[in-house]
Image (cartoon, helix red, strand yellow):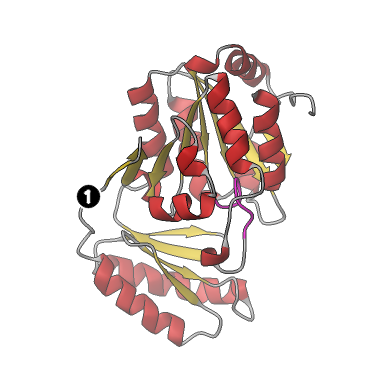
Amino acid sequence: MSELPTPATPEARSAFAAAVAEPSRTLVALDFDGTLAPIVSRPEDAVASPGAADALAGLAAAGFRLAVITGRPVADVLRLGRGFADVPGLVIYGHYGLEQWADGELTAPQVHPGVAPAKAAAGELARAHEGVDVEDKGHSVALHTRNAPDPGAVFADLRPRARQIGADNDLEVVPGRFVLELRPPGMDKGGALRRLVAESGVQVVVFAGDDLGDLPAVRALRELDVAGVVVCSDSLETPDELRQAADIVVDGPAGVIELLRSMA
């Protein structure tokens, strides 16, 4: 087992020490894709890294509060997590908190009425661009350009078109790594993290993510009245904004899992 890493600032070092010393007062909140599961070409092919469920179970046994906050539907995380459903006390916030799963129970609102026409319009865009995939996420829809011949150029071309689809259907467009997601306004990981902290009453939060969609949670953590530690799951595609905001940088999902094991 490796030694615990040293966070970058005195405040983060103090928060991390408090997290390890007082697990019952600590929430460990994690993104899924790129953090607990490697990024893959097709979202449906993703799967949690080996040892992820065991690492979470180890944290649960040590007394930590646990949550996964993801843009995916809860059903995806339970299917791809390979054992996540059996981790005691794990809470999953899917669709950036729109769906909530705890103790085997799922709660979710009705699908926004703009999602269905947005899916149809996104499908037309995808058919006109080689290698562009549409991901039906239930409460939202995403356009992926990762498999296009020139992913960056196609992403730039589709961005204004996706914005128009969003404007036509009362949805917002949120960019990620070669992905444009159309989703109901107000859905982000910052709001989900705020609710988790309010409901759990924890005093320390360790949050881990890897992409632009994790930045709202980072901002929320810095504003909340708790001690916080931001962990960046680093890869060649990780945005500089997240690296710069992080207190600890680890090498992708494998590094995150090793960190979790060390904390437990």
Type of the residue with mark 1: Pro
Does the stretch in magenta take in 253?
A: no
Tell me the chief SS of the magenta region. Answer: loop
* Along the line of sight, the residue nearer the viewer: 10 or 143: 143
What's the residue at 65%, 51% (across, down)? 238
Specify start and end residues of the magenta stretch as a single range. Answer: 33-39
Residue at the extreme bottom: 128
**Quadrant of residue 103 within the rendered picture:** top left
For residue 168, side relative to residue 76 (left or right): left
**Quadrant of residue 111 within the rendered picture:** bottom left
The location of residue 81, given as percent across then percent down, is 53, 49
Q: For residue 86, say whether it is visible.
A: yes
What's the residue at 64%, 40% (across, down)? 232
| Residue at the spot of label 1 | 109
The quadrant in which the C terminus is found is top right
Residue at disc 1, secondary structure: loop
The location of residue 154, given as percent across then percent down, is 55, 77
Q: For residue 73, say whether it is visible.
A: no
On screen, residue 193 above or below 166: above
The location of residue 69, given as percent across then percent down, is 45, 42
For residue 230, side relative to residue 201 (left or right): right
For residue 136, side relative to residue 231 (left or right): left
The quadrant in which the N terminus is found is top right
What's the residue at 33%, 78% (across, down)? 121
